[in-house]
Amino acid sequence: MFFIDSGVFIGLHNRRDDHHVQAKELVEKAFAGSMGGACTSDYVLDEVATYLRMRTSDPCLVAEAIDFIQNSGKINLLHIDRSVFASAKMCMEKYPSMPLSFTDWTIANLLESREIEYLLSFDSGFDSLRTIKKFSRLKRIEKI
């Protein structure tokens, strides 16, 4: 199974995004490849909708992205539960110098708890997780 981060969805749906072509190729190859099924989280969905709404002011684009994540049948939408939330909060406090947002920490802890190895993301901040044993098997993929 692989997890898709917000930057990939933003690039996929926003033709003006710097990562549009790369995101499109990455998603197409990931869906066709051997990494298993795709998933993302409700927090990522929120980031995607908020970013697209604020940066493009195009409600149709926002609706398209939300619909793709929720209803395409290709993506399992995972929800951040209390345990993952608490783990993310603890990590954010324990590793304040890591270049990760709270949503990024929820992603890392969700992947660790679900034993998901692959993260499709353009966010190089995730690479810093390799220094923490708990997250050392996580592999960020930005090109296939």
Image (cartoon, grey):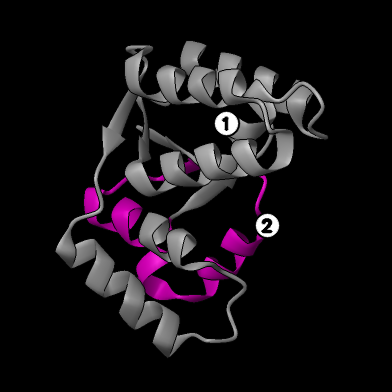
- 126 w.r.t. 117: above or below: below
Of tags 1 and 2, the one toward the viewer is 1
Query: Where are the magenta residues, as a range?
Result: 109-137
Q: On the rendered structure, is 76 left or right of 125?
A: left
Location of the C terminus (image quadrant): top right
In the image, residue 136 lies at what x, y percent? 45, 64
On the question of residue 144 being in view, the answer is no
**Circles 1, 2 touching at the beta carbon (< 8 Å):** no
On the question of residue 77 being in view, the answer is yes
Give the residue drawn at x 35%, y 70%: 134
Give the residue drawn at x 35%, y 42%: 41
Q: Which residue is mark 1?
A: 9
Pick whichever, 52 or 85, lies toward us.
Answer: 52
- Counting the numbered discs, the total is 2
Pick whichever, 98 or 12, lies toward us.
Answer: 12
Element carrying mark 1? helix
Sort mark 2 into few (<14), some (14-19) or many (20+) by Cα contacts within 10 Å: few
In the image, residue 103 lies at what x, y percent? 45, 59
- 98 w.r.t. 27: above or below: below
Q: Which residue is mark 2?
A: 124
| Amino acid type of the residue tagged 2 in the rendering | Ser
- 47 w.r.t. 72: above or below: below
Q: Residue furthest left?
A: 82
Q: Is residue 118 magenta?
A: yes
Location of the N terminus (image quadrant): top left
Of the numbered discs 1 and 2, the one sitting upstream in the chain is: 1
> Which image quadrant is residue 135 in?
bottom left
Q: On the rendered structure, is 25 left or right of 49?
A: right
In the image, residue 139 lies at what x, y percent? 52, 49
